[in-house]
Image (cartoon, grey):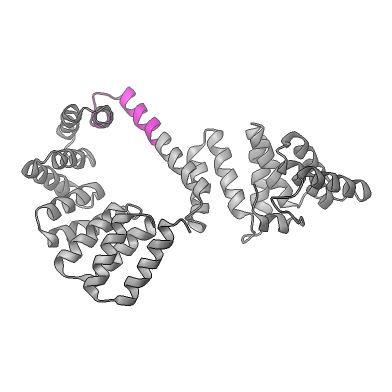
Amino acid sequence: MLAPLLLAALGMAFSPWQDLAAVEREATQEVRAQPSAVNWQKLGLSRYLRNNYPSAIDAFREALRRDASLWTSHLFLGISLYRTNQFSSALTSLENANRLAPSVAQGRDDIDYWLGATLIALHQPIKGLQALERLIGRNPRHSEALQLATETYAETASALWNRVAERAFETAAGQEVHGYALESDGNPSGALAAFRHSRDMDPKRTGPGAAIGRLLLSSGQIEAAREALGKELQYNPTSPEANLYAGLLALRENEPALAEKALKVASVWLPQSEEVPLALCQAYLALGDAVNAAAAARKAIAIDGGSGAAHDLLMSALAAEGDGAALEAEKRRWLRQTQGR
């Protein structure tokens, strides 16, 4: 269902309780009385709201025949074409909407979402993700865009990795992919052997060393993990994953200063990872730096407002800071969050 503000921008008063058939009948009467582009657009939208996409397509096309500058008709024509699996035609309409719409139009989110979805359907995931990233940049909480982007990133990465593994199994890259495949199949020892093989074939390759360190750390092999991560950082000092796991290892070994140093590097390259600011917060608390601990916890909350760990750490940091007002504010925020408001 479309946003009420966008419907209002199209000149239609609408509420969820209206009889949609009556809305379409009224729009039909307006077209008969005055067959203008705007009225044809209203008819198209009334049909769209009833999921009658073929008839909506006809109406939007007639609206555009009368006034090709109606970016909203291009938009809904594109969405309707997408809904009927006419992806190439949908892309043309959505590109027209993107070209004609004002830069601050209410429908900008819809344009970028459907452009992204259509490009992905046309097997152009990189271009599709660019459109979704524009939308997420404006509206970070757009749930449909976040879900589609996440799925597309995963599928694209998986396809690329599989292609590497199939074509170049006996290479450093192929063995690294093989390692991730074995790990996903629940074979950590086999994965560790594959990652080590990859690293031995190309010691300076970014990735395998961090994966080795992560697996060793998760199995409690602290000294071996420290050695693997140290070797990885020697070749790749800005490796995000190696710095993250080195920081977690340092926290585990009660070395908060070393943890802070590694995690600050990781935070630069993993800005959307909740794990990094959570770990940084723990390091700052151990160092007695309540101000930076609170800032790190707030960053984790900005990434995931429903994170219980981030809430607990922020409460600890604010208590250490002695900021009673901020403590009460966070309690209220968490209450609203947990009550779904």
Image side of residue 287 versus residue 154, left or right: left
Report the span colored magenta.
157-177
In the rendered structure, does residue 170 fall within the stretch colored magenta? Answer: yes
Q: Position of residue 44 (x, y in %)?
A: 77, 44
167 or 183, which lies in front?
Answer: 183
Rendered view: 212 above or below 273: above
Q: Residue furthest left?
A: 223
Image side of residue 177 versus residue 194, left or right: right
Q: How many marks?
A: 0
Name the residue rendered at 20%, 60% in the picture: 282
Which quadrant of the structure image shows residue 92? top right
Name the residue rendered at 89%, 47% in the picture: 29
Rendered view: 282 above or below 192: below
Image side of residue 24 versus residue 230, left or right: right
156 or 325, which lies in front?
Answer: 325
Rendered view: 48 above or below 193: below
Name the residue rendered at 14%, 45% in the picture: 229
Q: Position of residue 206 (x, y in %)?
A: 23, 42
Rendered view: 319 above or below 188: below
Which quadrant of the structure image shows residue 150? top left
Image side of residue 55 versus residue 218, left or right: right
Name the residue rendered at 79%, 49% in the picture: 42
Q: Position of residue 179 (x, y in %)?
A: 23, 30
In the rendered structure, does residue 53 fall within the stretch colored magenta? Answer: no
Q: Residue furthest right?
A: 33
Q: Position of residue 333 (x, y in %)?
A: 40, 65
Which quadrant of the structure image shows residue 334? bottom left
Which is the main secondary structure of the residues drawn in magenta?
Answer: helix
